[in-house]
Image (cartoon, helix red, strand yellow):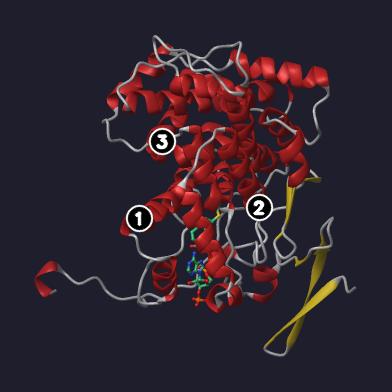
Amino acid sequence: MSDKATLIIDGQKYDFDMITGTENERCIDIQSLRDTTGCITMDPGFANTGSCYSSITYVDGAKGILRYRGYPIEEIAEKASFVEAAYLILYGELPKADQLKAFSARLKEHAPIHTNLEHHFSGFPKSAPPMAILSAMLNLISCFHPEVLEVPTTGAEFDRTASLLLSKVRTIAAFAYRMASGKPINHPNPHLTYCGNFLHMMFSDPYQEYEVSPVVDRALNLFLVLHADHEQNCSTSTVRVVGSSRANLFSSVAAGVCALWGPLHGGANAAVIKMLEDIRQSGRPASYYIDRAKDKNDPFRLMGFGHRVYKNFDPRSIILKKQVYNLLEALKLDDQLLEIALQLEEATLKDDYFISRNLYPNVDFYSGILLRAIGIPLNMYTVMFAIGRMPGWIANWKELHDHKLRISRPRQIYTGSRARTFVPMTER
Ligand code: ACO
């Protein structure tokens, strides 16, 4: 294979190095393009643009492959807890028993939030979207822990900061839900697992301690593991762009939460359930919604379908679908929305519009049904995604610093007016 790519502009040849990744993915290194040719590239949506080297997560969209640090998602989902997967994503290796113990102990230590931070929750209106609260509160943490503003990306201080964030995000999420529901907050219980503790903070009541069922604990672990990282998606790229200005970790991930919120990204998990509910309540057949999704004059899209990278299947959606069946059976639940989801999936698999555009269920299509079965309220679905994605965001922020990347600063092609003279108010 050639190690150079040649570009011809106005008859002049320019050579650029070819770069090959671990899995033989190829790229043209155009870092010198503007200096040597005076041109830039145009790639809105960055579908063909590599923004970094990364050793965290590998995705092969054509083959439906997802690996964290080389381990297939199928194996991690089956064998690892979320805490174990988070350690792997952050540090690059599966933890040994003593490392996992120390990491879990740090997560327990950092679960409580500062009492003064707690008071801020009451300042939000009852209708405040939990994603807005989460983003604001993550930014606020740094005011209570000013030492995190100067975070080294290695050593004990990074270990502490990463654990603090991974742990507190769960406490903030649960407190946001309790406050919005007008219920007293539940402080973290150090005797519970990462997921068990979250469920306790969400659902325990003063006279009724929430009993964490192992089936639900496992399902939540699996949900979080499947969301733990997904290379350079919209929110992770946002974390990197913000972090590239050397903004602190907390403000970088707060921006990531905002990016995740949108319905084309993490917000799709709630949008799927709203869509399925709509179908259920309207009594209309799946075909009505499929026709709307295909109609280019209708902005409606089939939520939970399609992916920028996966063009065959999303392995996370296959694992989640199986887990949804297991969970509903174990909890003896019957969810009509699952039936509707299956009808939609079946119909799209036979429809040329979806086949020709490679539109298949993505991670968000079945995840909402799992969260519903656990009892998570709809407005918390994307918050759940954010809790899961935290290891990926932190690891990418760390990698950005380890690689000493330059500030992110894309170029543009200007299409506005040419230079003109200012017109005084009386002459406009
Ligand atoms: N329903 C109907 N048509 C769709 C859908 C959909 N869900 N998704 C894509 N298409 C169509 C587009 O209209 C376009 O058709 P055209 O070629 O005739 O113009 C074609 O498929 C390609 O779509 P793009 O929007 O160009 O694909 P892109 O890679 O930019 O977007 C995205 C990917 C945002 C995921 C898109 O498929 C979508 O909007 N899906 C629904 C929202 C969703 O589920 N988001 C979650 C993604 S997973 C995640 O972020 C965790």
Residue 235 spot, x, y in % from top left? 54, 48
**In this rendering, which labeled residue sits more in front, label 3 or label 1?**
1
Q: Secondary structure at mark 1?
A: helix
**Mark sitting earlier along the chain (3/2):** 2
Let me know if residue 259 appears in the view. Answer: no
Residue for badge 2 = 318
Say which residue appears at 49% left-offset and 47% top-offset.
260
Name which residue type carries label 3. Pro
Find the distance from the CA under tag 3 to the CA under tag 1: 17 Å
Relative vertical location of residue 119 with respect to residue 8 in this rendering, above or below? above
x and y percent of residue 107 in the render? 63, 19
What crowding class fits label 2: few (fewer than 14 Cα within 10 Å), some (14-19), or many (20 or more)? some
Q: Residues within 10 Å of mark 3 (few under 14, many from 20)?
A: few
Furthest-left residue in view? 426
Mark 1 → mark 2, Cα distance in angstroms: 24 Å
Q: Going by the picture, which residue comes out furthest to the bottom?
A: 11
**Percent coordinates x, y for residue 382 in the rendering:** 47, 42
Relative to 205, is 248 above or below? below
Secondary element at tag 3: loop
Query: Which residue has dot 3 on it?
Result: 377
Q: In this figure, which residue is indicated by the disc labeled 1?
A: 278
Q: Position of residue 292 (x, y in %)?
A: 39, 71
Along the viewing direction, whichever of 132 and 319 lies nearer the viewer: 319
